[in-house]
Amino acid sequence: MQLQRKILILNASPRIGGNIDIILKKIIQALGNKAQVKTIYLNDLNFRPCQACNGCDKDAICVLDDDLRAVYKQIIEADVIILGSPIFFGSLSAQAKMLIDRMQPFWVAKARLKRKSLKDKKGFLILVAGSGNKTFFENALAITKNFFKVINAKYCGQLFFEHIDKKGEILDFPGLEPEAEKIARATLEP
Ligand SMILES: Cc1cc2nc3c(=O)[nH]c(=O)nc-3n(C[C@H](O)[C@H](O)[C@H](O)COP(=O)(O)O)c2cc1C
């Protein structure tokens, strides 16, 4: 029997039941039982931003003992990463950026220690913005691509929704389910 693909969903919105939450749940629904799905609500975690202490320089292990210890393990084991974030002040939310800065141990492993131990992954980005300013999506995408590169994830797809502001407003977007199904299918492709 073939092992199910491990899909790790990183929800970087603080709003439970908000737009990102709704979209990610539509993707999970579309996946059904075809994958092993785990969602992490970054806002629920207790973790600090990177302290630039160089503590990870020699062994690629972060010295901070907080909730990210478990998340590092989930990232290592994942076959697919889906990052969902609202646009806050023109870019990813602080929850997402704090996580990404803490990927420094993965950068050390790859760039300094020349380790090639991380398995290939697929990466997807889901964004929602109150405005229609495309530069904000470009900013968030550029940062996400850095993140995906460092964890060995190939950028494989995106859903960017503009002019969605109020909590739950995404439900008025007529094509939401087909779009979520498209992402779900793409996560399962070889
Ligand atoms: C602190 C904060 C900053 C925001 N900054 C922006 C912004 O710079 N540009 C924009 O288009 N929308 C901005 N928004 C609007 C959110 O992107 C929008 O409300 C989104 O739908 C929230 O998604 P959520 O319900 O998943 O949290 C901001 C909202 C908040 C709370």
Image: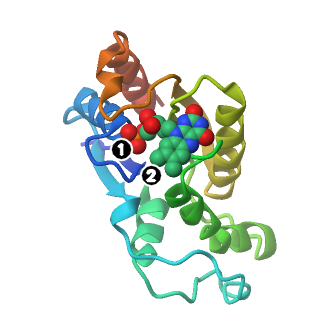
| Up/down of 106 relative to 90, above or below | below
**Alpha-carbon neighbours of circle 1 within 10 Å: few (<14), some, or many (≥20)?**
some
**Amino acid under disc 1:** Arg
Using the image as rendered, state which of residue 45 and residue 3 is in the foreground.
Answer: 45
Q: Which percent across, then down, holds residue 130?
A: 51, 30
Query: Which quadrant of the figure has residue 142?
Result: top right
Residue that label 2 marks: 12
Report whether the residue tagged 2 is closer than 8 Å to ligand 1. no
Left/right of residue 58 with respect to residue 37 in the rendered view? right
Q: Secondary structure at mark 2?
A: loop
Q: Which residue in the structure is indicated by mark 1?
A: 5
Q: Which residue is at the front of the view, 66 or 172?
A: 172
Marks 1 and 2, how far apart at CA: 22 Å
- Image position, residue 112 (x, y; %): 80, 74
Residue 81 visible in the current orientation = no
Residue at the extreme right of the image, as rendered: 112
